[in-house]
Each structure stands twice: as C-alpha cells, then as structure tokens.
Image (cartoon, grey):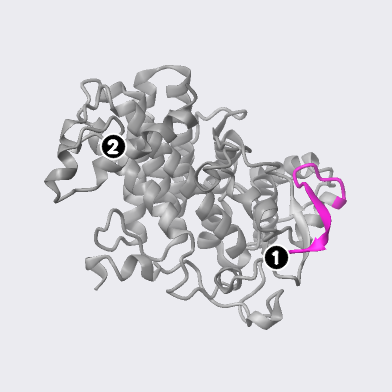
C-alpha cells in the first residue's frame, strides 16, 4: 500500500489520539475505524499514525511556503483576496489566517506522534520516530522563520529563539535515529535533518555550527515531499502551488524571474496563459516548476547545504567562485563582485536555485533589504489599489489561534 493511501486510511484513527471525549457512549462504540487513545500500541499502530502525521506536515509545508513566496516576492499574488494582498504587501493584519490552521495541524500531529513513538521498544532506531521528529523539527524551523511569535498544540507563546531550539532538538533526534536505523530511508531522513539543522543554526547566527551540520551532506542529495492527485482530497494531498496555479489562478511569476526564463535560464519555468489572473488585474504568468497536483516539494538538498556552508563560512573567494558556478548553470556570464554586492548576487542565485521551495523567508529574516528583487517598504505595490508595501518582517499569529488559545488571552 502506498504511503499516501496509508495516511488517508489512518486519518480517522489518528484523530482519536488528539481529541479527548467526555462522552462514554463514544468510546464504547465498536468501530473498526476508531481507536481509543489509551489502546494505541506504538509498535503496531505507530507506523500508520506517523505516516498520517507526516502527511499533515506536507500539507502544512505547502500552505506556509506558498504564503512566504508571496511575502518575499518569489511570487506575485493574482488572487482577489485582501488577505493575500496583505501578505504580498508585507502588511499583515491579525485577522489574516495566513495558512496557519493547516500548518499548525501538521506540527501538532507530528508532536503527538513523537510522544507516542518514544514509547516504542526500538525508539532509538525506529524510522517512524525519525520521520515525525523530522516533520516536527522542520515545522518549528518554518515557524521560526515565518512567525514573529509561535505556539504549538495550544501552548504558551514561543519566541524565535524558543522555536529554533525546539527545531534543533527534533532535528537532532531525527538525524541520530535515522543514522542508527541505517537503511537508505533512515539515512535520507538523517541528511534532511542535517540540512535543517544547518538552516536553524544559520538563522540563529551560529555560523560554525551551521557549517558543521551540513558538512557531510552529499552534493547530489535530495529529500522530496510527495503529493497525490486525489480529486477527493486535493486540499490535503495535492500540491499547493499547483492549486494556486490551475485551480485558482492566483500565483503569478514576477518579472525578474520571467526575465531569467526568457533569457534561457533552465532553473525557472513559466508560461503566459494569455488570460488574467483570478483578480482580473494581473496577467496570469503561470509557474511550471510544479506542473501538477502530484508534483513533489523538495524539502532539503545537497545544493541547499552548499548555500548554507558558503554563507556560514564567510569566505568571499569561495562565495564568488560558487556564485559564478551557479551563474554558469543558468547560462550567465561570470561576475567579479565583493562586499554587499557579492552577498546580494549570492542571495539572488539562491533564490533562483531554490525558487518556491520555502527558503527565501529565512534569507529575508537574516538579511532584510539586501534580499534581491524585494519591493522596498513604503513603495508602491504591484497592485496599487491595495496600498503601499509595509514594514512587516514576519507574520503575526492570527486571531484563529490567539482568540482560542488561553495563553494569549
């Protein structure tokens, strides 16, 4: 049975592990699709629960990276929604849902699965525990990069430092368990965790630790998150970027990225659909990096590891050499730059290589206005009627969280 079919089957089962019912009649019903929380065995039920939690993470990854693409200018919003325009303008109100509900569910179910699988007799080498540590760790990392303040499972506020620390804890566990398990899948989880650790340390300003974390990641490594074209479950199982391309015509490729593709850079792919986007205003230039509902996301790669190491090591000569290597991949002539100009070009090449993969938000948090092709605060937005570009550096927690979480009231 495929992992995606397995995760759909167990969704109802996993819900029983995270909801406490006060109804005796509910828990007395014999139902083959529902398991009492206290009756779950980490050895027999753990794998299904882990896969379901991981699929929740994949859905949350899509939701959050799509919104950060609008925020950082990787994509323009062709949506008619004021919420999306707020995100694109970097002026987000607290009522803006910003993909939080889907994202927070992925973190919560991953953490619940971690709690369960820690009780497994082979916890030190259990690949399912490694996998949900990976999804929990990346969830905390994405939350640290994206949200000004975080929270998990209805808990108290988490600062950026808190979120980074939790990301490092979970990713370290994923790496250790994956290495101990030793299979190809276990090693892949360990390497993806290493990339996440490098990214977390870089966000925290710990350059030496960041470089060390990614030092053993092979250059050709990739860790993919798989989606499925299931018409009945596209919201949870389908690619969010394709949904915003084909289902709602809301993701418009910006001019700077289109210019690269027009010049023959193979790293960017788009088509001019010949029609307007959903807002009836922008022309619908549609991305083709993710060409369908089942297109996978790339969570981690050896290429990202190289970017982390080069930035962390801070060697201008190595950075320039790497920049020109990546420019050559895109068919561009070499450059001879130094100082801030070199850093800007380095970040631009990273934005091209890892386009729409969710890494640009962390770059923005670290480098701010040095991030290339970002409309400066106060300037006119590409949809002028929405108002000027704002000054937000991160997303506020939305009211759907703060109004229901007792720690924020």
Residue 117 image offset from top left, x and y in percent = 26, 31
Q: In this picture, which residue range is highlighted in magenta?
A: 262-277
Question: Is the residue marked by circle 1 packed among few (<14), some (14-19), or many (20+) residues within 10 Å?
Answer: many
Q: Mark 2 — residue?
A: 114
The part of the image, by quadrant, that contains residue 226 is top right
Q: Mark 1 — residue?
A: 278
Say if residue 134 shows up in the picture. Answer: no
Residue 79 image offset from top left, x and y in percent = 65, 66
**Could you tell me which quadrant the C terminus lies in?**
bottom left
Disc nearer the start of the sequence (2/1)? 2
Residue 74 image offset from top left, x and y in percent = 66, 58
Find numbered disc 1 in the image and state the secondary structure of the residue it sits on: loop
Residue at image location 67% in from the left, 80% down from the top? 379
Q: How far is disc 2 from disc 1 in space, using C-alphas? A: 40 Å
- Residue 130, above or below 348: above
Q: Is residue 337 left or right of residue 194?
A: right
């Amino acid at each position: 049975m495929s992992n995606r079919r397995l995760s759909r089957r167990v969704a109802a089962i996993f819900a029983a592990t995270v909801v406490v019912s006060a109804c005796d009649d509910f828990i007395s019903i014999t139902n083959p699709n529902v398991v009492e929380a206290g009756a779950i065995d980490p050895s027999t039920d753990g794998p299904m629960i882990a896969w379901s939690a991981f699929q929740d993470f994949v859905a949350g990854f899509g939701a959050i990276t799509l919104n950060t693409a609008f925020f950082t200018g990787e994509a323009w919003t062709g949506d008619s929604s004021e919420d999306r325009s707020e995100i694109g303008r970097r002026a987000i109100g607290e009522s803006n849902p910003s993909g939080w509900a889907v994202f927070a569910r992925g973190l919560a179910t991953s953490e619940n699965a971690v709690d369960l699988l820690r009780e497994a007799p082979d916890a030190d080498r259990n690949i399912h525990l490694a996998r949900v540590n990976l999804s929990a760790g990346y969830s905390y990392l994405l939350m640290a990069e994206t949200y000004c303040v975080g929270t998990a499972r209805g808990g108290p506020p988490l600062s950026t430092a808190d979120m980074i620390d939790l990301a490092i804890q979970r990713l370290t566990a994923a790496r250790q368990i994956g290495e101990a398990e030793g299979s190809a899948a276990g090693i892949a989880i360990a390497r993806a965790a290493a990339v996440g650790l490098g990214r977390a340390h870089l966000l925290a300003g710990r350059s030496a630790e960041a470089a060390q974390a990614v030092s053993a990641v092979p250059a050709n490594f990739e860790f993919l998150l798989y989606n499925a074209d299931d018409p009945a479950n596209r919201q949870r199982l389908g690619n969010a970027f394709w949904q915003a391309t084909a289902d709602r015509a809301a993701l418009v490729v910006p001019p700077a990225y289109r210019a690269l593709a027009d010049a023959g850079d193979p790293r960017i792919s788009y088509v001019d659909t010949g029609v307007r986007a959903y807002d009836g205003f922008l022309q619908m230039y549609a991305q083709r990096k993710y060409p369908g509902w089942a297109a996978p996301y790339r969570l981690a790669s050896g290429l990202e590891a190289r970017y982390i190491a080069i930035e962390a090591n801070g060697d201008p000569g190595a950075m320039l050499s790497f920049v020109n290597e990546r420019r050559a991949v895109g068919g561009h002539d070499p450059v001879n730059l130094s100082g801030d100009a070199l850093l800007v070009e380095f970040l631009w090449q990273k934005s091209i290589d890892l386009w729409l993969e969710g890494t640009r938000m962390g770059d923005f948090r670290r480098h701010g206005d040095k991030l290339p092709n970002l409309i400066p605060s106060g300037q006119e937005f590409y949809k002028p009627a929405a108002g000027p570009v704002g000054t937000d550096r991160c997303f506020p927690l939305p009211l759907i969280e703060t109004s229901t979480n007792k720690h924020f009231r």
